[in-house]
């Protein structure tokens, strides 16, 4: 059995290749049982989460990801998300690889957002607002830049020092990255807004969204979390990665449905439908689009297969 490190995953999974691999995966027949989602009490801290995510492609591979999410880990200088991925032979069940879970997760998550943006963001989108400064932030920036001509990025975070540090690390002469403490102004000027936070209160307000904006929501993976308000959902053509996952776990969708701001039947499409051409993405230039991602084991399996092939 091979052990594939975070560095090897990083080297193997360039975004153009990974986005295309995910596109093909959503078009194929991959079995994905409902993932196991368990809340874990933490003495003196916020609840943690244990996720078990299996998937298999008949006669090819079986994969299982085990992930923990500990929101307070930032105070310990540790990543909030940790875990491992096990890839098995689909014909014999033999273990093939043990793959670094956090790196695989951030890469596939960012690639899924980029895949959605390929169909939903304006083709001339150049200005990206990144809301959040965690491990996903730099990956989302580069993933979006792989499918759209992004060349101006603003980063906002609750900790301005972290936003400034990340901006300095990513800034280049041909790819301008800066930080901001004015979230509203940055949102009003963005072509694409990508959010990856653990917020329980809306950060992006619908009144701020300009015609043609694409909103990418990656955080708020529990029903009691959210990154946008009801008005943002009302104004947008809404898409999700999977209907079953987003309507059960994605706080931006769950709370909007509960308040009446969104009817589940009004969700315009998921990644299965838009990659297969069954539903259209962006219909016109000035349309506001919104994509809510909660993750699916399809993405993990596709990324693990590509990493195993290349590592």
Image: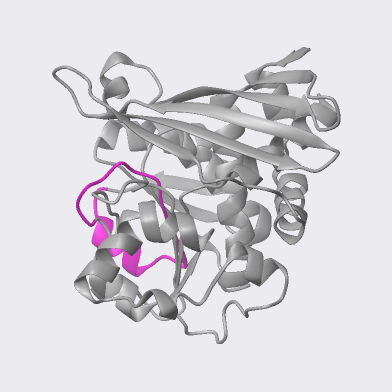
* Left or right position of 102 against 25: left
Which of the 4 image quarters holds residue 28?
bottom right
Quarter the N terminus occupies: top right
Res 214 seen here = yes
**Residue 189 on the magenta span:** yes
Res 186 seen here = no
Which of the 4 image quarters holds residue 215?
bottom left
* Left or right position of 181 against 29: left
Q: In this view, does 280 lie above or below 59?
A: below
Q: How many marks?
A: 0
Front residue of this view, candidates 311 and 122:
311
| Residue located 31% across and 78% down the image | 234
**Residue 266 on the magenta span:** no
Q: Position of residue 253 (x, y in %)?
A: 34, 63
Q: In this view, does 66 lie above or below 215?
A: above
Front residue of this view, candidates 101 and 205:
101
Front residue of this view, candidates 290 and 257:
257
Which of the 4 image quarters holds residue 229?
bottom left
| Residue located 81% across and 43% down the image | 58
* Left or right position of 222 against 287: left
Span colored in magenta: 181-202
Q: Where is residue 201 in the image (x, y as percent from the top left)?
A: 19, 52
Q: Is residue 174 above or below residue 61?
A: below
Q: Is residue 150 above or below residue 142?
A: below
Q: Where is residue 155 in the image (x, y as percent from the top left)?
A: 38, 46
């Amino acid at each position: 059995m091979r052990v594939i490190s975070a560095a090897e995953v990083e080297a193997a999974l360039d975004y153009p290749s990974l986005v295309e691999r995910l596109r093909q995966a959503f078009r194929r027949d991959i079995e994905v049982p409902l993932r196991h989602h368990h809340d874990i009490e933490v003495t003196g801290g916020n609840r943690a989460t244990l996720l078990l995510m299996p998937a298999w492609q008949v006669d090819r591979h079986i994969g299982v990801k085990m992930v923990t999410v500990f929101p307070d880990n930032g105070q310990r200088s540790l990543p909030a998300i940790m875990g491992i991925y096990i890839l098995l032979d689909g014909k014999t069940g033999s273990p093939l690889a043990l793959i670094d879970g956090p790196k695989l997760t951030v890469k596939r998550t960012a690639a899924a957002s980029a895949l959605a943006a390929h169909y939903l963001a304006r083709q001339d989108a150049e200005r990206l607002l990144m809301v959040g400064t965690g491990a996903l932030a730099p990956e989302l920036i580069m993933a979006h830049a792989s499918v759209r001509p992004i060349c101006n990025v603003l980063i906002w975070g609750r900790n301005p020092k972290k936003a400034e540090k990340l901006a300095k690390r990513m800034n280049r002469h041909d790819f301008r990255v800066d930080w901001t403490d004015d979230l509203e102004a940055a949102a009003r000027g963005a072509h694409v807004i990508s959010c990856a936070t653990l917020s329980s209160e809306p950060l992006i307000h619908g009144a701020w969204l300009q015609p043609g904006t694409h909103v990418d929501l990656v955080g708020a993976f529990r029903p009691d979390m959210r990154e946008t308000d009801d008005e943002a959902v009302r104004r947008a053509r809404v898409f999700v990665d999977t209907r079953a996952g987003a309507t059960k776990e994605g706080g931006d969708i769950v709370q909007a449905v509960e308040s009446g701001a969104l009817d589940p039947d009004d969700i315009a499409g998921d990644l299965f439908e838009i990659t297969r051409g069954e539903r259209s993405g962006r219909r016109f230039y000035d349309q506001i689009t919104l994509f809510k991602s909660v993750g699916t084991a399809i993405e993990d399996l596709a990324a693990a297969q590509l990493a195993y092939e290349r590592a």
